Image (cartoon, rainbow, N blue to C red):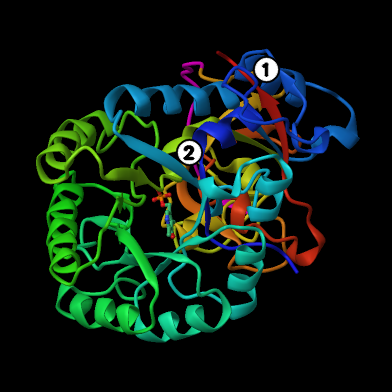
């Protein structure tokens, strides 16, 4: 059995497992700690793509653990009251509950945050002393009562997710109007409800979603208190943006959220969060190799014609990672990926300006499926078989859901620490 399923782990411990400079809470098993280089992303990419060996054409990620640590430091600086619990599902590299436990993360620092769980998984979590878990419906309470009655429960409420790229409200979250019924049910079952959680949706692009949700959580706290519960935990979920110069910035969320939490929740209430994307998005850069290409040339009537006489052909590139692999983020996470030339005829081009002529291109994954199309209308200089492309910000919801469909391996990860 693969264990388990929407685990959220205290990031201080998670980060310490993968980042030696962060304080180690307990000793990790040696298997868990990847070999970590101390080189720039550019130098690793360069070494990886300028090898001439045919065996070395596999796609690979460079994961900068320093970036994860910097994001953690930023969180601590801008939202010091909120303890982040990393959302393992976002990039379980290399952790799930069992792996986190194996790595020495204390079970008290793990939250099982899927409100609709399989009974045997609840049992497993409980057997490992992972006792804090979320719920948002009465049937879940009856199930928990049967298999793990000692659990400490967190009621996930429904908040406005309309300003997020990935909305969760249709699937999870109890609306405020049924909070009394759920809490009364919990009470009648003698279950311990310790607080309230929410998730504004992943890829949130409006800071007020967080503050509005905190206001709603306050109302849920008040209902709980009126019913005799003594809530001690507020979990403000995930949805925080990765480190990307475009779009909503974490600092702007923190500037609104911190004071709102302080205004509505007294200091003895423990406040935690469940960020996923925030930590890993910018830490992963993907390098992919062009394994095949097709030059497309059409005459005035739109019929295929001899490309050697066309000064403006378009190109179809076939690369060795695709929609069934790391680029599943395009389907499942609504990600917009930007392909850039990385190495062209042996010339390394990472983060370099160029004035090469651009051609309309489409980029395809390696499988035999036509749905394996990463993007059309991408403007790239002419690339050849064996050249490399790169994509930055490929850490969130990429390898986490990648498959080996059609026999293609998942991209390797090379770790570095640029701190
Ligand atoms: C329960 C839960 N918590 C946290 C997260 C992390 O969300 P994000 O990556 O948007 O921070 C998710 C992911 O979607 C989730 O389902």
Magenta-tinted stretch? 352-364
Q: CA distance from mark 1 to mark 2?
A: 27 Å
- In-front residue for pair 118/370: 118
- In-front residue for pair 42/13: 13
Secondary element at tag 2: helix
Badge 2 density bin: few <14, some 14–19, many ≥20, Cα 10 Å: many
- In-front residue for pair 139/284: 139
Residue at 20% x, 68% y is: 228
Secondary element at tag 1: strand
Circle 2 is placed at which residue position?
A: 281
Q: Nearer the viewer, mark 1 or mark 2?
A: 2
Q: Position of residue 271 (x, y in %)?
A: 30, 43
Tell me, yes or no, if residue 366 can be seen here.
yes
Circle 1 is placed at which residue position?
A: 347
Q: Position of residue 404 (x, y in %)?
A: 75, 60
Up-down: is 192 above or below 110? below
Q: Position of residue 15 (x, y in %)?
A: 57, 31
Q: Is residue 269 left or right of residue 71?
A: left
Q: Quarter holding the C terminus?
A: top right
Q: Is residue 295 left or right of residue 338?
A: right
Q: Residues at badges 1 and 2 in contact (C-beta under 8 Å)?
A: no
Residue at 34% x, 74% y is: 136
Q: Quarter holding the N terminus?
A: bottom right
Up-down: is 238 above or below 346? below
């Amino acid at each position: 059995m693969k264990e388990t399923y929407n685990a959220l782990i205290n990031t201080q411990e998670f980060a310490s497992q993968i980042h030696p400079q962060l304080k180690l809470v307990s000793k990790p098993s040696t298997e868990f700690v990847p070999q970590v280089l101390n080189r720039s992303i550019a130098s690793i990419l360069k070494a990886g793509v300028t090898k001439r060996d045919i065996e070395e054409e596999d796609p690979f990620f460079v994961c900068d653990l320093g970036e994860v640590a910097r994001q953690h430091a930023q969180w601590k600086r801008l939202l010091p009251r909120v303890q982040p619990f990393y959302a393992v599902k976002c990039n379980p590299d290399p952790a799930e509950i069992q792996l986190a436990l194996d790595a020495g993360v204390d079970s008290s620092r793990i939250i099982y945050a899927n409100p609709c769980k399989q009974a045997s998984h609840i049992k497993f979590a409980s057997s490992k002393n992972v006792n804090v878990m979320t719920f948002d419906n009465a049937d879940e309470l009856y199930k928990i009562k049967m298999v793990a009655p000692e659990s400490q429960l967190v009621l996930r409420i429904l908040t406005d997710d309309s300003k997020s790229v990935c909305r969760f409200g249709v699937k999870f979250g109890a609306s405020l109007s049924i909070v009394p019924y759920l809490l009364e049910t919990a009470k009648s079952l003698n279950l311990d409800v310790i607080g309230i959680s929410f998730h504004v949706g992943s890829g949130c692009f409006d800071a007020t979603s967080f503050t509005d949700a905190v206001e709603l959580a306050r109302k849920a706290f008040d209902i709980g208190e009126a019913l005799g519960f003594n809530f001690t935990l507020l979990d403000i979920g995930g949805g925080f943006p990765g480190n990307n110069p475009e779009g909503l910035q974490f600092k702007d969320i923190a500037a609104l959220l911190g004071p709102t939490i302080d205004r509505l929740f007294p200091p003895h209430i423990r406040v935690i969060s469940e960020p996923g994307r925030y930590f890993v998005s910018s830490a992963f850069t993907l390098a992919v190799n062009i394994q095949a290409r097709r030059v497309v040339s059409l005459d005035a009537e739109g019929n295929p014609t001899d490309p050697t006489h066309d000064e403006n052909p378009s190109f179809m590139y076939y690369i060795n990672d695709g929609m069934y692999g790391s680029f599943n983020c395009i389907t499942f996470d609504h990600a917009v990926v930007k392909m850039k030339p990385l190495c062209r005829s042996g010339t390394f081009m990472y983060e370099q300006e160029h004035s090469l002529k651009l051609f309309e291109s489409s980029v395809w994954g390696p499988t035999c499926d036509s749905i394996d199309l990463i993007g059309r209308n991408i403007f790239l200089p002419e690339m050849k078989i064996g050249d490399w492309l790169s994509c930055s910000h490929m850490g969130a919801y990429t390898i986490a859901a990648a498959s080996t469909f059609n026999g293609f391996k998942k991209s390797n990860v090379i770790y570095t620490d640029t701190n």
